[in-house]
């Protein structure tokens, strides 16, 4: 999920996240969701943690990918 820089703030990202998770549950009966976040993306990590998600795995990647 990516928001344009001018759309950041004001709760838009949170609303998109909540809508996506609600759809996953209602349409696909998802009992669990997995979110992948780049470790350096502090803003996104803060959003997910504030929504009650927990870090259960941290990967180390090498290279420029």
Image (spheres, grey):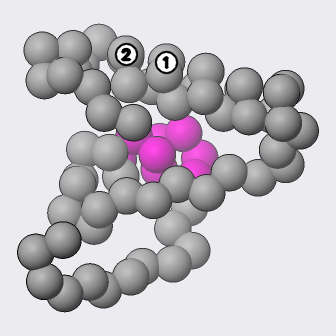
- From the image, which quarter does the C terminus lie in? bottom left
Query: What SS does tag 2 mark?
Result: helix
Observer-nearest residue: 62 or 16?
62
Asked if the residues shown at circle 1 and circle 2 are in contact, with their CB atoms under 8 angstroms apart, the answer is: yes
- Check the image and report above or below for 8 versus 41: above
**Residue ID for mark 2:** 12
Q: Quadrant of residue 60?
A: bottom left
Is most of the magenta stretch helix, strand or loop?
helix
* Region rendered in magenta: 46-53
Residue drawn at x 51%, y 78% as measured from the top left: 57
Query: What SS does tag 1 mark?
Result: helix
- Check the image and report above or below for 4 versus 24: above
Query: What is the x, y in percent for residue 10?
Result: 29, 12
Q: Quadrant of residue 38?
A: bottom left
- Check the image and report above or below for 63 versus 49: below
Spatial separation of the CA atoms under disc 1 and disc 2: 5 Å
Observer-nearest residue: 10 or 27?
27
Q: Is residue 27 shown in magenta?
A: no
Residue drawn at x 60%, y 28% as measured from the top left: 20
- Check the image and report above or below for 7 versus 58: above
Residue drawn at x 37%, y 16% as measured from the top left: 12
Other-residue count near label 1 (Cα within 10 Å), few / some / many at <14 / 14–19 / ≥20: few
Q: Is residue 2 left or right of residue 25?
A: left
Other-residue count near label 2 (Cα within 10 Å), few / some / many at <14 / 14–19 / ≥20: few
Q: Is residue 49 left or right of residue 37?
A: right
Q: Is residue 7 left or right of residue 34?
A: left
Query: What is the x, y in percent for residue 30?
Result: 82, 44
Residue drawn at x 13%, y 23% as measured from the top left: 5
**Residue ID for mark 1:** 15
- From the image, which quarter does the N terminus lie in? top left
């Amino acid at each position: 999920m990516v928001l344009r820089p001018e759309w950041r703030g004001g709760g838009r990202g949170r609303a998109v996240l909540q809508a996506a998770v609600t759809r996953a549950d209602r349409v696909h009966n998802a009992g669990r969701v997995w979110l992948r976040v780049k470790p350096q993306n502090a803003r996104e990590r803060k959003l997910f943690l504030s929504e009650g998600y927990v870090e259960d795995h941290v990967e180390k990647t090498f290279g420029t990918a």
